[in-house]
Amino acid sequence: MRKTLKQTITAILAAAILITGISPGGTITAHAATTVENFNQNGEATMKPGDVKKLLVMDKSGKDLVETYKWSSSDSSVLKVESDFVDDSVDFTCCVYVTALKNGTATITGKSIYGYQSLTMTVSVQLAKATAKQKKCKHTWKTTKKATCERTGIKTCKKCKLQESIAKKAHTWTEKTVYTQECWHIIHCNACHCDEDPVLYEKCENGHCSTMCDLKVKVEDYRDYKNLPGYEKAGSAIDAAKIALVRLHQQADADHCTAYAISPGGSITILSGYEDYELPYGPLIPCGTETVCAKCDTKK
């Protein structure tokens, strides 16, 4: 399911100001073999092949910012970067999920979906170099981290504890059927911003409502927006659905948000926060095949 967070100008400016609150490193907790740390803006970190880190990206108030950035690795063969959630010990907080695959250096980059300053962090993936004593050892190796088709493994000497990499395994390719499914495109109010109204603002924590708004409309219902009375200025089916969301707010007499503002020129500015996403329905329909790895699902 594709999900893109969209917010108002007021909320975007607030996020831009609060982004300076990102913590400069520091381990918060550890769960199993995964380390949970704060994202270290313009900082550096060292990992071993196979290690996993979950990096928290928050503003000064503790609000997650991970979903407002698109994350990538400068070298996906060295460092795999995804979005995920930490466990309940830190309240299911959204995070950047980083997996070290092999020796090398890669940069994690988060690009703001609103055009603000990018976030970067450099990660060096390496094993400790052998000491003079370890170089003289007649090694007896034990596999301490198995190699997979996604990352190298590690072998450790039972005597001197020196560690060396084990080559990554080859992919196991197979043909897989690809399916498609029809989807509704939904415009959904997910948080209403009350900054324009001092009375409403006092009711909300940090200017944002604590309750989620369940109002939603389907873009498909407004594809023929040009023939709908009052929708001449919409410009697109998505914009027509946004205006419909505003009208739903009016009809529902939603007292927790200032739903819209009208400029002297007559244009409408949506003040309530919203998200758009696709909601699948109907049967899965085969639409072809693709070659993928049977073990890691990587596409060829």
Image (cartoon, rainbow, N blue to C red):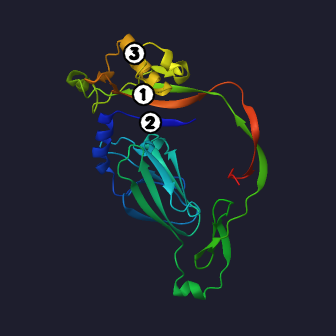
Establish if 274 lies above or below 290.
above
- Provide the secondary structure element on which disc 2 rests: strand
Q: Indicate the position of residue 231 as horizontal and vertical percent values.
A: 43, 18
Q: Amino acid at mark 3?
A: Arg
Disc 3 packing (10 Å; few <14; some 14–19; many ≥20): some
Residue, disc 2: 5
Establish if 177 lies above or below 248.
below
Residue placed furthest toward the right: 175
187 left or right, relative to 176: left
- Provide the secondary structure element on which disc 3 rests: helix
Q: Indicate the position of residue 100 as horizontal and vertical percent values.
A: 55, 61
**Camera-nearest residue between 250 and 62:** 250
Residue 233 in sight from this viewpoint: yes
Q: Amino acid at mark 1?
A: Asn
Q: Are marks 2 and 3 in contact (CB under 8 Å)?
A: no
Residue, disc 1: 190
Establish if 285 lies above or below 102.
above
